[in-house]
Amino acid sequence: MAVIVASVATAVALSPPPAFDLDSSVGEAEQILVGSVDEDGLLSVSEVVAGPVKVGDRVQISKESIILRELRAQAPAGFRVDVVAFLKIDKSGKPASVPNGNGLVGFKDGMAWSHRGSMVIGNLGITRQQFMEDLRLARIAREEREGLLALPRSATRTAKIIEFALKHDPDAKHQRVWSEGAGYHLNSLAVGLKDPSLEDHAEILDCLKRSSAGKSQRVLIDLARLIPLAPESFDAISPFLGRAHGSEVRYAAIWALVRLDSARAIEALLPFVEGSEPQLFDVLGGLEPESGGSLNSAVIPPLSRLATEIKGADKMNEEGALFNRMIYYAHPKFVPALLDRASSSDRLLSVRALHALKEMTGADIPADDLDSWRAWWKRFKPELSAGYDLTSESGCAAWSKAWAHGDPAVRKLLVQLWLYEKEINVAWLAAAAGADPAASRALAELRRWDRLPAERR
C-alpha cells in the first residue's frame, strides 16, 4: 500500500503511485550509499553497497531534493533520517541522484519514502530491513545480467539471456510507454543484443514459437522489438495480433511490428480497425508510417466507418485516437464522414468532430458553426470528391485546376493527395513548378515529408 504525501497541483493523484524502481536505480547508480542524512543534506555513510566511498565518509546530497524538503517539513526539529542514496557523479565531480531511478529513499515512521517526478510517496509495509533485502537482490541481478552480456555471442548466451529476462520480468501490468514498459532489465539486455547474429535471431524466434504462456510471449516479442530483430521476423510475430491472445501480448506485437516494418504493420492492423476491437486505441496508434513512406489509402474506408461506429463516454480515448489519425492522414474523403458525425444530436460528439475537421483542414470557419461547414463542403465538393490520376499529365493538370479554384483549406487537402502516391511524378512537378504555384506547393510538401528522390531535394 502506498500513500501520496505531497504533490504539485498537476500531479495525477488518482493514478496508483509507482513502486520503487530498484532495477533502474541500481543499474544506473555509480554509488549506492546507506546512512543517515541531516536537514542540510549531509549524508553520514554507514554502509557502502557500491562505489569508491568508505564507511564514515560524509557526502553532500542536494538539500533541494524533493524528498528531503518534504521530510524536513514533517520533522523540523533534530532532523535526521535513515536513507539509501543512488548517486551518479556529475560533470563537476559531485554526486547527484540518478536521473531515472528513485535517487534517494528515506526510512521514517515505519515507512519507506521515495519520490517520483513531482510526488513524494510513503510506502506502508516496506520496512528498512525489507528494502535492504530487495536492494541486495537487485544488486545480485545486476551482476548476473552484466555477466551474461559479457559472454561471447552464441546460441547458449542468447538462451541464458532469455531465461534471465523471463525470470526478472516485472509482474506489473504492461505500461504504454516504450522506454519503460518492457522493464529495465529487458531494455538493458536488448542493448547487449544489438545487431543480433543469426544464432541470436533464431534462438529468440524459436523460443517464441515454443512458448505458450502469455507473459513469456510478451517478453520475447518485446525483446524482438527493442533489439530490434531483422524485418524477416515480422511473419513470426504477426500472428500474435490475433484476439485469441491476451491484451499485453497483442500490445507488444503491435509495437514490435511497427518497429520492424511500419508499412507492413499498417496492412496487418487494418483488419482490426473496427468499432468492436477491444484494443482499438493501440491499433490506431500503430497506423503511422515512417517518414519518407507513402500514405496507405487502404486506411481511408475503415477510418471513415469508425466515425459512425464509436460513440459514447466510454469510447472517448478511442474517438480521440481516431480523430488524430484522420488529421494525420487528412484525406478529402474524411470530410463527409466528419460532417456526418458532427450532425449528431449529441453536442459533445458534434463539437469534437468539428474540431477535428478544423484541425485537419485549417479552414477559417468557426469550429462550432456546422452550417458554415456544410456550405463549405457543398461549394467545394466537386474539387474534393474528384479522383485525380497524378501519374498522368492530364490528371495532374486537372488537379492543378482544382487547386487554383479552391480556398486554402481545399488546397491543403489536395496537396495531401500527393503523399498517397507510391511513385511521385517528379517529371511533371519539376516542369510545372516554375509557372504553376500548385506544383511548387506540392514539391515543398513532398520535400517536407522526405518523399523526393535525393537528386531532387
Image: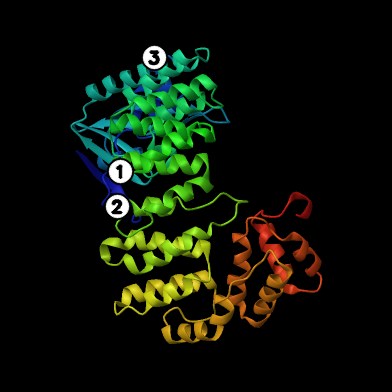
Label 1 residue SS: helix
**Mark 1 — residue?**
247
Q: Which of the two labelled residues, at mark 3 and mark 2, occupies the earlier sequence position?
A: 3
Bin the neighbour count of mark 2 within 10 Å (Cα to Cα): few under 14, some 14-19, many 20 and up: few
Closer to the camera, 293 or 297? 297
Q: Is residue 170 visible?
A: no
Q: In which quarter of the view is residue 197 placed? A: top right
The x and y percentages for residue 385 are: 54, 76
Q: CA distance from mark 1 to mark 2?
A: 9 Å
Label 3 residue SS: loop
- In the rendered structure, the answer to whether residue 237 lies left or right of residue 5 reads right
Q: In which quarter of the view is residue 16 placed? A: top left
**Mark 2 — residue?**
278
Q: Which of the two labelled residues, at mark 1 and mark 2, occupies the earlier sequence position?
A: 1
Q: Amino acid at mark 2?
A: Pro
Identify the residue at image location x=76%, y=74%: 436
Identify the residue at image location x=34%, y=25%: 210
Identify the residue at image location x=74%, y=73%: 437
